[in-house]
Amino acid sequence: MSLSPRTTPTLTQYLIEERRRFPDASGDFNALILDVAMACKAIAKSVAYGALADMYGNHAADAGGSINVQGETQKKLDVVSNELFIRMNEWGGHLAGMASEEMDLPYDIPAQHPRGKYLLVFDPLDGSSNIDVNVSVGSIFSVLRAPDATAEGGPLTEADFFQPGTRQIAAGYALYGPTTMLVLSVGNGVAGFTLDPVMGEFMLTHPDLRVPEDTNEFAINASNSRFWEAPVKRYVDECLAGKTGPRGKDFNMRWIASMVAEAHRILMRGGVFMYPRDTKDPSKPGRLRLLYEANPVGFIMEQAGGRASTGQVPMLSVQPTSLHQRIGLVFGSKNEVERIERYHAEPPKQDSFAPLFAERSLFRD
Ligand code: AFP
């Protein structure tokens, strides 16, 4: 460890430098991001204490556990993280409302606190089904501008949040892994900060992150392969065929089941992530959620030179129609995501290459 005086900028310094691009800015936005960062630090602490602070296991509402709006069993840490996001962000006067994976309806700023001009949308603890086995999890957030009427005191409605991803003012995630990191875009590239646990500060360790345009790594839950649509099957089959297939190179596969951790790996070294629309449950047009998973991660990817898509259209162009809307999501290295989009646009090929189900393949004896 170097003993020279620390010159690495903090998150606060980074935000102040960024704000200089907007001489008329009030400082509200920077204060909001610092409140979000404070929530992430508090969550990082709870995650790190784990079993020592009785943080593992399911949330025990009425001793029978609790189910969120998604129909998923809430972990203790889901509930704690949601509460931390709310408490750290409701008082500052920067927000007109919040929405979360863990809350059925939007959260109104209590009357005793001033209202502001932004909306905060978050997944307080993504990948929380991995918590009890100590795998990396994270928080994902997105900042939108509130409609004027709401910012000025009108009623907060679900429709206030129905803004396409292109309208995000900022987005990011915190990753609670071997180190705690905050990855942030305020619309001017992507920067990564590492939490210095002694100083309690996020330090700018990864300025100007870029996603490599090409990759030989893909991530998908292959147990769903029988439900995939033809373009996804084709793409994965071609990757699995490796050097001897149409791609002419070998691929590696990864699946953490913690999207924020996969997003971070892809941001650092390239790759493609797919949780595509499939036929598993026709009532759900995808597994992941548009407003607090796909859009913020999509914004980060695009700001880092990567790409995010539904498979059919750019993710950030999708007009949301409900708060907890699910969607098919593909993101990562630009050239691979574009290839998957091309496969969706092309008419299905009768003689398409399908080694997964061919004579000598993974899924045959
Ligand atoms: P949890 O937050 O319930 O663990 O869900 C995580 C997640 O939304 C996303 O982070 C993963 O990529 C995906 O679900 C994993 O889904 P599968 O369990 O179907 O692989």
Image (tube, rainbow, N blue to C red):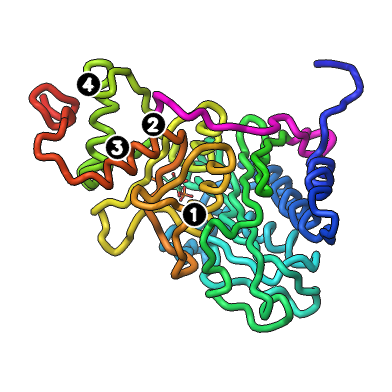
Residue most toward the right? 5
Q: For mark 3, does the 10 Å Cα neighbourhood hold few (<14), some (14 to 19), or many (20 or more) residues?
A: few
Residue 48 in sight in this render: no
Q: Amino acid at mark 1?
A: Leu
Write the residue at 64% across / 83% down.
155
Instruction: Check disc 4 and give the amino acid type.
Output: Gly
User: Residue beneath label 3, please?
Assistant: 222
Q: CA distance from mark 2 to mark 3?
A: 11 Å
Quarter of the figure with residue 209: top right
Choose mark 2 or mark 3, whichever is in front: 2
N-terminal label among 1 and 4:
4
Sequence-first disc among 3 and 4: 3
Foreground mark, 3 or 4, reads 4
Residue 197, percent across and down?
78, 34
**Badge 3 amino acid:** Ala
Contact (Cβ within 8 Å) of mark 3 with mark 4: no
Dot 2: what SS? strand
Residue highlighted by disc 1? 316
| Ligand 1 within 8 angstroms of badge 1 C-beta | no
In the image: residue 123, left or right of residue 193 = left
Residue beneath label 4, please? 245
Q: Give the residues in magenta.
A: 195-218
